[in-house]
Amino acid sequence: MNINKVVFKKMIFRLLVILIFFVFSKLHAFENRILFKINNEIVTTVDVSEEINYLSAVNKKINDLDKNTVISIAKNSIIKENLKKIELKKNFQIINLNEKELNMFIANIYKNIGINNLNNFKKYLNEKNIDFKRIEEKIKIDRSWNQMIYNKYADQIKIDRESIEKELKNKKIKSYLISEIVFRAKDKEELKKKFDKIKKTIIEKDFETAAIIHSVSDSSQNGGNIGWIKENSFSNIILKNISKILPNEFTDPISIPGGFIIIKVNDLKNEKAIINLEEETSRTINAKINNQLSQFSNIYLNKIRKDIFINE
């Protein structure tokens, strides 16, 4: 009986080994399937999978898209990168960035996804099975490409510095004279009941009286009055809501930490913005240059794509 058990276990073990080998072989074959060629460069399912992994790591919104769209984005990203590499080999050279420059561009990537330092970024990439050197390579290719495009089209870039400075000197910023009512509600039903009650008081009395009666904020003592606030001091959600209404109108309840807020715009005005003219001018010029270079880059990519064989 014991001998039979041993034989049976050996048979099961062998079957499992064979099954695992079969599944692994099929999976391996699938992962290395050729999808298309760019000139003589083959692109496999592994390449696309790795590109998807990279794209989803540096832009989490990718994860919200459907599978076919993500695959299409990854393929286009691979094609674009290969077109750049092919052209750079012919007409330029890959720039070797110094450590400071490289770290600056890497920082732009990880700060955009909410990571605060390089070490944490490396850990994040390790968890995603992404080689850090691949990030460095992508940065070098993009910087080299951008420099090549700049060299080719620098004489076609048109920047009117005088016009930019004039516009910035006259730049205005909105300020809002506001009042608030802050209240709490545990669910949607209570939120609706309280808002209806507050609106009733506003209609029958006025906003200031409603603030005194219903607001839990310290500002309720002076009728909810906050004073003049510049638009760049508001959170995005509050600015979005108050920018839709006119003076003497009030918003619907806006969710804030600890409750809800209703804001009344009592008045608004445009004030001259206090800026560092030199810094703002440089920032605006750089943005305009980058925008034009991006357009030239797309034009040039479309041009060279016609001369490169892509067998999809």
Image (cartoon, rainbow, N blue to C red):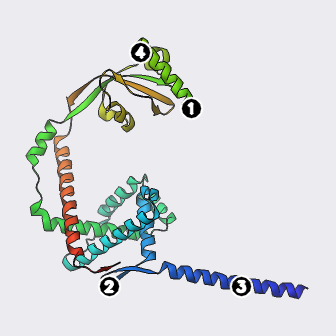
x then y, percent, for residue 260: 48, 29
Q: Where, quadrant-wise, is the N terminus in this rendering?
A: bottom right
On residue 40, which mark appears? 2
> What amino acid is found at the position of numbered circle 3 in the picture?
Leu
In front of the other: 87 or 200: 200
Q: Which one is in front in this view, the residue at disc 4 or the one at disc 3? A: 4
x then y, percent, for residue 173: 23, 33
Q: Which residue is mark 3?
A: 15
For residue 185, which quarter of the picture?
Answer: top right
Tag 4 near tag 3, CB within 8 Å: no
Characterize the local packing of mark 3: few (<14), some (14-19) or many (20 or more) Cα atoms within 10 angstroms: few
Locate residue 302 relative to residue 99 in the image: left or right: left
Q: Which residue is mark 1?
A: 187
Locate residue 266 relative to residue 194 in the image: left or right: left
On residue 129, which mark appears? none
Separation of residues labelled 2 and 1 (CA atoms): 62 Å
Dot 2 or dot 1: first in sequence order is 2
Dot 2 or dot 4: first in sequence order is 2
In front of the other: 106 or 176: 176
x then y, percent, for residue 42: 37, 82
Q: Which residue is mark 4?
A: 203
The residue lying at 40 percent from left, 13 percent from top is: 206
> What amino acid is found at the position of numbered circle 1 in the picture?
Asp
Dot 1 or dot 3: first in sequence order is 3
SS for tag 1? loop
